[in-house]
Structure formats: C-alpha cells, structure tokens
Image (tube, rainbow, N blue to C red):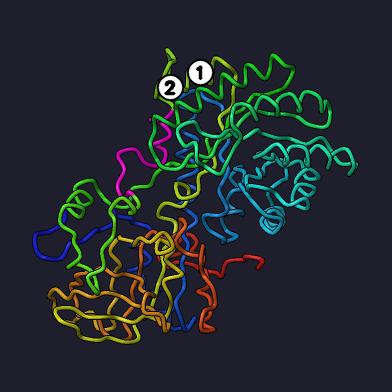
Amino acid sequence: MAVSAGPWPTLPVVPDPRAEAVLSSGLIEELSYALGGPFHFLLPDAFDTNLRALREALAEAGVDGVVYFAKKANKAAVWIERSAEGGAGVDIASVGELRETLGHGVRGEDIVVTGPAKDPALLRLAVRHGALIAVDALDELDALITTVRTGRVRRARLLLRCLPPAQPHSRFGMNDTELATALDRCVRAGDAVRMEGFSFHLSGYAIQPRADLAGQLVDLCLKARALGLDADRVSIGGGLAVSYTDAESWRAFLDVQNSGHYHADRTFDTADFYPYHSPHAGAGALRTLLATRPEGYGQSLAGLLRDSGVTLLMEPGRALLDRAGATVFRIQGVKDRAGYQLLTVDGTSLSLSEQWFNSEYLPDPYLLPMNPEASAGVWPAAIGAATCLESDMLTWRKIPFTRRPRAGDLLVYPNTAGYQMDSNESAFHDLALPPKVVIDRTDRDRPRWRLDRHFT
C-alpha cells in the first residue's frame, strides 16, 4: 500500500471492508440521485466495534473504566443511540446536547459535562439529571454549589479539572493553588457535592505526557480521600489517535509533497497536518497508555489505577468513529489547468473541517465514475466548492485519479465521521446541509439505510 513512484503523492486509506461493500453495492449512486446533493453516510457497526475494542483493552489490563462518546465529534443521533444500547456514556458541553442525549435514551448518570465556563441553565439541568460535571474554574465550582443549595436539586457530582503542567497556557483547568482552594471548598460544601475525582484536557496524542498526568491525578485522589472526599476516578479526556493510512504511505507522503503538488502552489506546514498514521491508535493507544509507567512511579498506569481503586474515565470521539462514515459529493464542473484539472463539487469545504485548522484533509477520495469503462490513466485534479469564495477548496492537493473525472461523477471522502462532517457546516449560499444516512447491517447482500434522527 506504499505510495507509488511518480510526481503525484497519494495517501490511500487502510482497507475498510464495510465501506468497500457499500461503495460496490450501487447504493451510493442511488442515494446521490434521490437526495439531490452531497450527503454523509454512517456505519454504526464500526462504532460498536471500536467501543468493544476499548473495553477489551481495559479488561486485559484489569482496569475499571468508563467510556464516554465525545458528542462534539459528530452531531448524528445514531451515535447517542448506540452509546445507550452499548452502555457507554456521552460527553456533552451545552444544554442542547444534554437534551438531545437524554432524548435518545442515555441516562443522566451516564453523561459527563465538560465544556468551559458552563451556563447556569446547563449546570441546573446537569445537576437535576445526575450528570457528572467537570468543573473548570473556582467561580464555576461556587456557581455549582449555589445551584444545589438554592435550587432544591440533588447533590452535584463533579470532577475538578487540572491545568496540565506540560501545557501551562491551556485555557482549560485549574493550577495547583486553585485546586487546593477547590478541594477545601468541596470539603466545606458537605452534602451539596460529591467530588468524584479529577480530569484534564491535554492537547495532542503523545502517550507519555498523558500517562504522567494521569499518574499524578491518582495521587491527588488519595490526598482528596484523606480530606473525606470520594475521589475514586480520573478522566484522561480524549487523545486516542486514529490511523487513516499505513506508516510507509504516511512517511513517503511527507517526504515528497511540496507546493507544486497543490493548486495555486499552496503550502502547508506539515506540523499542522493531523498525524494520519500513528504507531499507537484507538484501542492500541489505550493499551499502550495503560502499560506506560508514569514518570516518577515504579509501576504502570494500570497498576497505579488498580492498586488505588481508581476508575479510569475517557471521552474519545475520533477513536470511536474510526471508519464509521464517509462523505459524498457530485462533480458538477471540470476545468483544465496547466497539467491538472480543477473540479467543482455540489458542496463546500465546511463539510471537511480540517480546513478550519489551516490544514487539509489528506486521505485520497474515491472517484465513482458514471462510466466505469473510461480509459485508465493518471488525471491529477484539485477539488473546489460550489461557493464564490476563492479559498473554498475541499482539496488543494492535486489528487492523481486513475480515471478522468467528469461532471456527474461522484467523489467519496473516506473515514470522515470523526470531526470532519459537521463541525463547521452551514447553509452558506443557501446550499442545503448534507443529510446523514445511516447504513445498517446488510440484508441479502443489500445495505439498508435510513436518515439519521438528529433532533435539530
């Protein structure tokens, strides 16, 4: 699967039998005709597989753990439904997300609220339903205690979020002095709160810093217990990487890509690219994390958790959505440029959110030609959107298609369920938002589909 020789770098995705079965079934062409525009298709079986894999990693390490789906990674209701059916929790950050999560069958006790500077209405609703609340600041803790004492609601369940020492400029969490004050206020609050432990928000995918901080928070749990608090759990947030491609293809791509491979000689800082290959991904990343020895400790993180009776919480988004969906556009215009083509599709780059980070969604899209008998060759093409913005490009890179793209052909961007589909989508130019189609298990070799039941 390595990148082939030649002037045009490629980045093929790892084989995905579920997606390949859908692409070869003829359903994508039928849906494009019926829906009349771009759409996303979702593969919920992949979510179930990823959830099982994470739980197996916890079980193998002998660690008690709870998996919460990070709802911000994808707005579709089907993931909440699968979380409810699979016994997973959901991580939310707004009143709307909380209402929708409850409405799709997740119990309040299985919800964790992690947004910064939470609205009072969110705090009231979260306490009323028994959700776990990650407290980000001292004033938020005070507001939560006041909510309980004045609102005649149940005891508040909370975690105290720590500022990562390795990322002192993070906007999330409290420093050591603030944490000490927060612990004292939790003790003084008495029955108003149940302080269940600590959490952190750590950017990036490095394993060792996450293990180091988790080990420190286990120690903090022991200190908090000495003060009479419950403190029996630690949340590591997300940060479990996903591998979209193999190691050789990713290395070769980075080695050869340059501005000449992009429309308008666009350049990207490779440090801004998502790491499309990781040696430790998904459940494998969790296994590695649990086996890692935090700095200054004599045993693995798994051993620390077991010996201290601390439950590990995590809030993965991308890792649960790996290979759980793709995005489909129809080509509606083709222009010839010097040495390549410039395609225009019936959607916008707002459906591929990597552009939000001044980056590019790099995995190669599939071309589904109307005429599969078209002659083979190498046809490099960049891909633009159906708006009047010069910068609205789905793919700046000149993709070396093996068939000549033509108007009416379909482009399928693979593995877009995690953070790509809908973080930035809007009805710009009054273009309709791409619907989400849930493709369930096959019946007599024919996929069954339905529209997602997202409330809003």
Picture layout, residue 322 above or below residue 362: above
First reached walking from the N terminus: tag 2 or tag 1: 2
Q: Label 1's element?
A: helix
Residue 162 lies left or right of residue 260; in this view the side is: right
Residue 284 place in picture, x, y as percent? 38, 36
Residue at the image position 35 percent from the left and 86 percent from the top: 332
Residue occupying image coordinates x 24% and y 74%: 264
At x 40%, y 20%, the residue is 293
**Left or right: where does residue 380 sit relative to residue 358?**
left
Within 10 Å of disc 1 (Cα), the crowding (few <14, some 14-19, many 20+) is many
Residue beneath disc 2: 294
Q: Which residues are magenta?
A: 275-289
Residue 329 position, x and y percent, is 39, 76
| Quadrant position of residue 33 | bottom left
Crowding around mark 2 (Cα neighbors within 10 Å: few <14, some 14 to 19, many 20+) is: many
Residue at mark 1: 304
Contact between labelled residues 1 and 2, with CB atoms less than 8 Å apart:
yes
